[in-house]
Amino acid sequence: MGGVRMSSNLDKAKKALDSIIKKSRVHLYKPIQIAEILYKNRTSNEVDDLGDLETYRNASKKWRDIICMQFLGRICTSSAKFQDNLFEENAMPPFLLKELGNENKKENGIVEAYIYKAFEDRHLQLEKALNYCLNSTKEDFEVKSFLEQFWEQPGLKRSLDKIFEIVVYSLFEVLTTAIEVKIDIYYEKKRFNLIEEFEDFAGKVLNLSSADDRKTLDAHFNRVGVTNAADRGLDMYANFGSVVQIKHLSLDEELAEDVVTSITSDRIIIVCKDSEETVINTLLTQIGWRSRIQAVITINELVSWYEKALKGRFSNILGERIISTLSNEIKAEFPSVGSNDFQEFKKLRGYHELKSNYWRINT
């Protein structure tokens, strides 16, 4: 069981699995789906033949989601097409999955254990990085140092978009609410008859009525939530009209056009690396969309604003609120960090007893 295997087909299957793990974000949805297919194949009659994709293509998404809800507090919300890419020739086609299944049965779940070891390692990396924020005070938190932990660690780089989003959101939301920005919503008196005619619409949609013609709201930013695999679309929006697209990857002309055309607002804020600012401005001008961009904000500007908020004249009203918002958003985004439930799960399935040089388990 501890020896290195030389099967070329198994090597191909392992290489394909390693590639999927490497490309996965910290949640490892696709590797977990593979692990659960192998678990069912090993322990039940729900999957008899791994070569017959249709017997597990859809069911395996449910098996994966059960595990993900337990340890991540969320499930995969990518398109069905993106999820089904898992079984394509360049990922984990059934004939390679069958190789993993044979090995997995022979070695009492070794491939499952290997996948969950990768999940655990990724989360230990994540926990160390996130604890920097969770244990920091306004005096010692450095936003650039925090972000660099994700840029420098290959296992965390795929999750940088979410961290970047949380960093931007925390600053924008705290500053906006601390400044006490207000929004006035009202309608022209000459339109009273129209409001009266559509009283139910005005009440349910506009939160106005013929008797109540004006509302004052507090300004807020909101995170949309899931960022899709192509890293395009809307990341944050404000209830006063601005929307925010956060970029940490290179932006080409096609993606620049897609970012802007996927959002109907004409007040788009793009947050990007300093090195991308000129490229983004040039591209947006070339494709004729520059007028729809309210601002391009760089990481250096973010760092400067963080420094002022945490250590400047108003740190007494901003500092702790920013650290608290950062921490709360991180806990909400990565609920599995710091949980002991995973160790119990490994013991329950017997993964903790397995050893292998080939699969790098407990060696």
Image: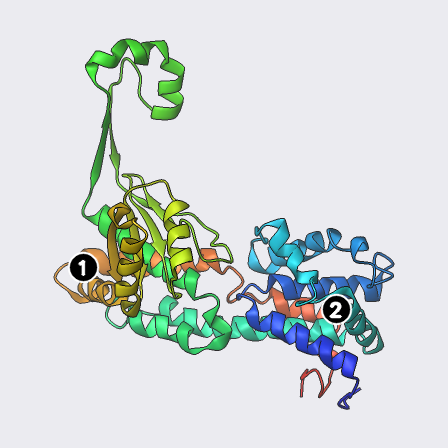
Q: Mark 1: which secondary structure?
A: helix
Q: Position of residue 169 (x, y in %)?
A: 33, 54
Residue for point 66% across, 64% down = 32
Residue 316 seen in this snapshot: yes
Q: Are marks 1 and 2 in contact (CB under 8 Å)?
A: no
Label tally: 2
- Report crowding for label 1: few under 14, some 14 to 19, many 20 or more residues within 10 A (C-alpha): few
- In this rendered view, identify the residue nearer to me: 89 or 147: 89
Who's the residue at 26% across and 58% down the image? 281
For label 1, the residue is: 316
In x, y percent, where is residue 282? 27, 60
Residue 351 visible in image: no
Q: Which mark is residue 349?
A: 2
Amino acid type of the residue tagged 1 in the rendering: Asn
259 vs 220, nearest the viewer: 259
Using the rendered view, name the quadrant where residue 190 is placed: top left
Label 2 is placed on what type of residue? Arg
Measuring from the top left, give residue 362's x and y in whole percent. Answer: 67, 84
